[in-house]
Every structure is written in C-alpha cells, then in structure tokens.
Image (spheres, helix red, strand yellow):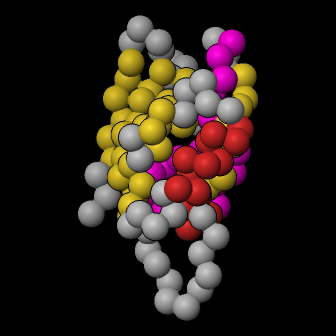
Amino acid sequence: QHPVSWTPSIETNRLIGHMILNKRQRNGTNQKDSGSILGLKVVGGKMTEFGKLGAFITKVKKGSIADTVGHLRAGDEVLSWNGSSLQGATFEEVYFIISESKPEPQVELVVSRPMPMG
C-alpha cells in the first residue's frame, strides 16, 4: 500500500507530490540509509530558484521504490521527509534527518517539481 498523490499548486506553478514509501527490507543485507533503501539520493543545502536553501533529489535508481512507486526524478525538490521540513536546511541537517529515519518502516515525502509546460 503506497499512497501517492500529485497536486498542482497554481500560485507557485509547481506540482506537489505527497507519498508514503514503504521500505522492502531484504533479509540479511546491510542497509545503508533510508535514501538508498528507497533508491534515491537527496542532497541538502542547495540553492533553490527562490534563493533559499533546499534539498534536491540528485539520483533515482532505476527500478527502485522511488522510481516505480513514487515516480520521483532527479531535480525534484524534497520539501519534507517524515514530517521534518527540509526547506532552508543545510547539507548536514538534511543528512541527519534522513539518517535518523533509518529505523522507520516507511518514509513520508513531500516533493515539488516545476509544472510540465504545455
């Protein structure tokens, strides 16, 4: 059960994605962190187009939960991770928030991406 919804935000001209991704734990494998389990890499402390710090997906592994369920792409901005806002967070803060969520069975994400043209 993976609830995923994308809703357009007219005032910011962006699509907002809200999703809960369950981690499929593989037995006996040593999991690194929540991001790699879900198949995505999130890097914080990057400048957004609005001149604020933000966290962005830099890599999505093909065939991963992030790819097949979340339909996430590199370049998507992650607004919050398990209820913690990543907006205005530094590289270290984002890294800490994501590593804190390692024991959680699922990750709730709110992401934002520019609206497709046309």
- Residue 81 shows up from this direction: yes
Q: Residue at 62% across / 81% down in the picture?
A: 30
Q: Residue at 38% across / 67% down in the picture?
A: 105
- Residue 116 shows up from this direction: no
Q: Residue at 66% across / 52% down in the picture?
A: 41
Q: Position of residue 92 (x, y in %)?
A: 70, 42
Q: Position of residue 85 (x, y in %)?
A: 48, 33
- Quadrant in which residue 93 is drawn: top right
Q: Position of residue 46 (x, y in %)?
A: 72, 29
Q: Residue at 39% across / 12% down in the picture?
A: 10
| Residue 87 belongs to magenta span | no
Q: Is residue 16 left or right of residue 42?
A: left
Asked if 3 appears above or below 48 in the picture, the reply is below
Q: Is residue 11 left or right of residue 76?
A: left
| Residue 63 belongs to magenta span | yes
Q: Quadrant of the N terminus?
A: bottom left
In the displayed orientation, state which residue is furthest to the bottom: 28
- All told, the count of numbered labels is 0
Name the foreground residue: 73 vs 36: 36
- Quadrant in which residue 21 is drawn: bottom left
Asked if 6 appears above or below 4 in the picture, the reply is above
Q: Position of residue 106 (x, y in %)?
A: 39, 61
State the extent of the magenta-drawn residues as a range: 51-75
